[in-house]
């Protein structure tokens, strides 16, 4: 989600009167809502997941009359949700096969295989946003909600009571390098 912020901010700069509405999983909604250029955040709930459950939500989205849709997920579900929603439609070039090949070849580089560099995701998000009129994107900048800072501080305070050892942060589900 954070890597999409550069493209979103560029779109907001190019279209200052436009409403930028993010559709994200509920666990990311407060982070996205803290960005000053986001007009509204709609949280995808569990009842919106899957084909049968998502039909009512998709029908609701279709009734709203969108001007443009930027699909920065580009998976079968997001394509299904966004198909036909707006006259302007763009999606990022996910290059999943290239990313998988990059990871696979890195694990075999001792055989002399050379991997091709993978272009950073936020640049590919920027390219997709340009298709619907975004300005030049800057690297993503993040404004954290105040509650996030408080949650982090309470975690570190609790950790300090348990162990004086350093903390290692891992990003679960970050399966591919960017």
Image (cartoon, rainbow, N blue to C red):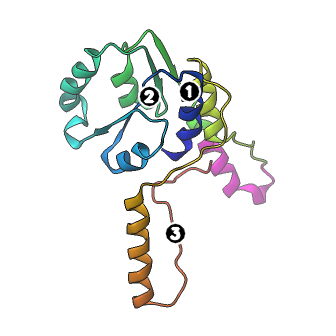
Residue at which label 2 appears = 20
Q: CA distance from mark 2 to mark 3?
A: 31 Å
* Disc sitting over residue 55 in the figure: none
Q: Residue furthest front?
A: 17
Q: Earlier in the sequence, mark 2 or mark 1?
A: 1
Residue 1, image x, y percentages? 48, 44
Please state if 50 lies on the left or on the right of 85 as rendered: left
For image coordinates 55% across by 17% down, the residue present is: 132
Residue under label 3: 169
3D distance between C-alphas at marks 2 and 1: 8 Å
The answer to which of marks 1 and 3 sits earlier in the sequence is: 1
- The magenta stretch is 99-113
The residue where tag 1 is placed is 11
With respect to residue 86, does 38 lie above or below?
Answer: below
Say whether marks 2 and 1 touch (CB < 8 Å). Answer: yes
Q: Residue at x 69, y 39 (%)?
A: 119
Instruction: Say which label, 2 or 3, has the lower sequence index.
Output: 2
**Which of these two is toward me, 22 or 174?**
22
Check disc 1: other Cα within 10 Å, few if <14, some if 14-19, many if 20+.
many
């Amino acid at each position: 989600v954070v890597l999409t912020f550069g493209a979103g901010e560029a779109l907001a700069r190019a279209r200052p009167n436009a409403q930028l509405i993010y559709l994200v999983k509920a666990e990311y909604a407060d982070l996205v809502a803290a960005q000053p250029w986001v007009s509204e955040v709609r949280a995808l709930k569990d009842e919106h997941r899957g084909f049968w459950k998502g039909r009512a939500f998709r029908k609701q989205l279709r009734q709203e009359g969108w001007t443009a849709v930027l699909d920065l997920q580009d998976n079968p579900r997001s394509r299904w949700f966004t198909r036909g929603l707006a006259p302007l439609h763009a999606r990022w070039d996910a290059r999943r096969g290239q990313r998988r090949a990059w990871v696979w070849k890195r694990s075999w580089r001792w055989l002399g295989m050379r991997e091709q560099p993978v272009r950073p995701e936020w640049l590919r998000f920027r390219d997709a946003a340009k298709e619907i009129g975004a300005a030049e994107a800057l690297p993503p900048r993040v404004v954290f909600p105040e509650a996030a800072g408080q949650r982090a501080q309470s975690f570190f305070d609790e950790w300090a009571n348990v162990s004086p050892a350093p903390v290692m942060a891992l990003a679960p589900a970050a399966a591919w390098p960017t």
